Image: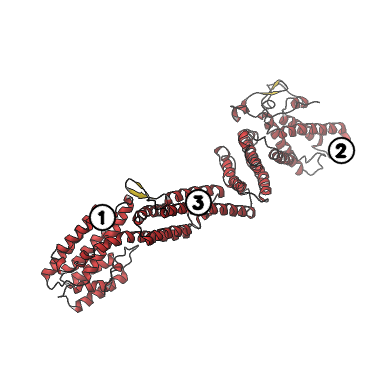
Amino acid sequence: MRFPKLKILRSPRGQSPTEANNSATVVDGAQSVSSDEEPENVILTFEESLERLHLSQASQMLIQREERLFGEITEAEALKQHKEDVDKLAADYRKLKDIVESVIDQSMSVSIDGVGPDTLTSAVKAIYQEEEQDQRWRQRDQTPPAWRPCRWKADHDSKLSKMVKDRLDAPSTPPAELIDQSSLQQEINLIGRQLKDDLLWVVGVVRTCYPPQAHICNFYARLYHQFFSSRINKIANFGLVDKDCTFLLRWVNEYYPGILQSPDLAREIDTEAFGKLLPKELLEPLEEQYLSKQQSELKTYIGRVLDEAAQKWNNGEEPKREDGCYTSPVAYDIIQLINGMVTAAEKVLGDLTKAQSVTRELSVFIERFRSFQDNIIRQNREDSKAYIKANLGCIKQFREVLETKSSLFLEDERVKCLSVLDEMKQSAHMYLLNPVHDSLKQNYRKLGTNDWLNKSAFDKLLVSIETQIHDLQGSTESCHQELMCQFHEDVTVEYMRRLLKGEVKLKDRERQDQAYMLVKSNAERLHSLFSRMGSKEVWLKEILTKMAEVLKLQDLPAIQMQVVSLGSAFPDLSEKHISALLKLKTNFSKADRKTVKETLKDALRETTVENPRPFFSKVPVK
């Protein structure tokens, strides 16, 4: 008997697998029936069932014949009594098996003509029927026929394994866009495309031809994973150039997982069960090679950015201005590069923690940036202030990305960088503010004196401060605001230092009330002035106001309560500070001062403040 060549339908372009599954199929020009069902009262012979590819029906016929021949007798008895029937049955089994295997062989065919998915369904059903018959014979206490167990399911699994290997060994020819890639990249891309197309076909069409308990999608996916992994392992064992190393890692950690996690496949395939394409011992050297390359590139690029900034400084070029503010591209350029490299590395490595290693030497580069700033300050040229104001913008940009995008950095490296940047900001503020404080020294000297008590000294201080503001402008708005905050704090610290020197004596309640009103007024006016200039440090007014309250109060218990309140809010307040303040009240006894200091000491021992603002520690007291 001659059987037609079998071809399983793949859906034509533009037609879904479901439509292909429902469509009519053609065998040698004749339309076939799309199932094993025949019109009522039509009974097919075994040969007719084979001819029409009703394979499960043909299998059932053979099993029934087998049961009639061997159901109650041994193989020897059957051969003796019905040798011709037994030989014919064996031959028919071989015919059926040949056709079933031919169908399985072509279940991934790309042809659009031939037998449809219904024939594959029939073949699969036949395989499982024969598997069940094998199982029935295992449970019987008699010798089975020679072809039992037939192990069609095991043969099916082996055939699929070979088919998958063959398809990945000989993927389709590369499309035009792959021509410019290296041979390794072409090979992996073609295998990956073949794998993706085949698994989509399995999920869309082949799956519908198998019973759910077969888990055929996972079975195919595991085969493709094993063979793809084997190929990738062989490639990884050879020394790879950096470009191919990166490409291979992207397939392992990005492209391949992306294929399996696509919605169409993820619904049917247990992707978690497969693991990585490469084992740890092959993956780690590739990751180290990739990271080393990225770190080297980052080092080179940051070095180039810093060198260009230093070159502009050496050439005497003034920093660019935008909206009247000095700016520098240093931070922006470096941040963009880091963000791009770490984001890319996370995809290539499939692990953010590993990707962060790209920036493991960032603190070294920040130190270089600090050295550049120190050199600008040390030379103190006419354009130094402009460069420092531009640098303040860079410092703020670096800080913001380190604080808001901490996932880009290793934690210990991030902390180091933030510490260096804090020191750089303080250094820049000191450089810009020290000349201003020098010009204000004459006004500072009058604070806490009788001239101050007569109000004129503080008025002159405010006027002098306002005249200095122009020289401090030129940094970006947020950086100028931070500079004003620092200026505000510096003036308040100096005010407190001068007050606690004790040059003014408050001999009675009247002068103490006068001092209270003056300090409170000074705090308000200082706050008002610096608020207009951009400072947000409201707490500085609170310190002066609380200290003024101590000058006003006369009863020891009230003074104790006020000092406890002050110490609770600002735990760096010391007994020396309180003693110096109380000494201004010359009518306050030494014994009372000691009592208040003991009260403060006890209160501080019980006070716990998270992230307290340091203030009094900056105010030296003899």
Give residue 40's position: percent from left, percent from top: 68, 21
- Can you tell which of label 2 and label 1 is closer to the viewer? 1
Rounded to the nearest angstrom, the CA distance separating label 2 from label 3 is 88 Å
Amino acid type assigned to the residue bearing label 3 in the image = Tyr
Amino acid type assigned to the residue bearing label 1 in the image = Ile
| Nearer the observer, 526 or 14 | 526
Rounded to the nearest angstrom, the CA distance separating label 1 from label 3 is 38 Å
Q: Is residue 139 visible?
A: no
Give residue 83's position: percent from left, percent from top: 87, 33
Asked if the residue under mark 1 is in contact with the one under mark 2, i.e. CB atoms within 8 Å, the reply is no
- Is 594 left or right of 374, judged from the image as shown? left
When the figure is inspected, residue 127 is found, relative to residue 399, above or below; the finding is: above
Give residue 414's position: percent from left, percent from top: 45, 58
Give residue 63's position: percent from left, percent from top: 76, 34
- Is 586 left or right of 81, judged from the image as shown? left
- Answer few, some or many: residues within 10 Å of disc 1's Cα (few below 14, many 20 plus, some between 14 and 19): few
Point out the tag, 2 or 3, that comes first from the N-terminus. Answer: 2
Residue 469 is tagged as 1
- In terms of secondary structure, where does tag 1 sit? helix
Point out the tag, 1 or 3, that comes first from the N-terminus. Answer: 3
Residue reaching furthest to the front? 315
When the figure is inspected, residue 494 is found, relative to residue 60, above or below; the finding is: below
- Answer few, some or many: residues within 10 Å of disc 3's Cα (few below 14, many 20 plus, some between 14 and 19): some
Reading the image, the residue beneath label 2 is: 77
Rounded to the nearest angstrom, the CA distance separating label 2 from label 1 is 117 Å
Which image quadrant: the N terminus? top right
Which image quadrant: the C terminus? bottom left
Reading the image, the residue beneath label 3 is: 301
- In terms of secondary structure, where does tag 3 sit? helix
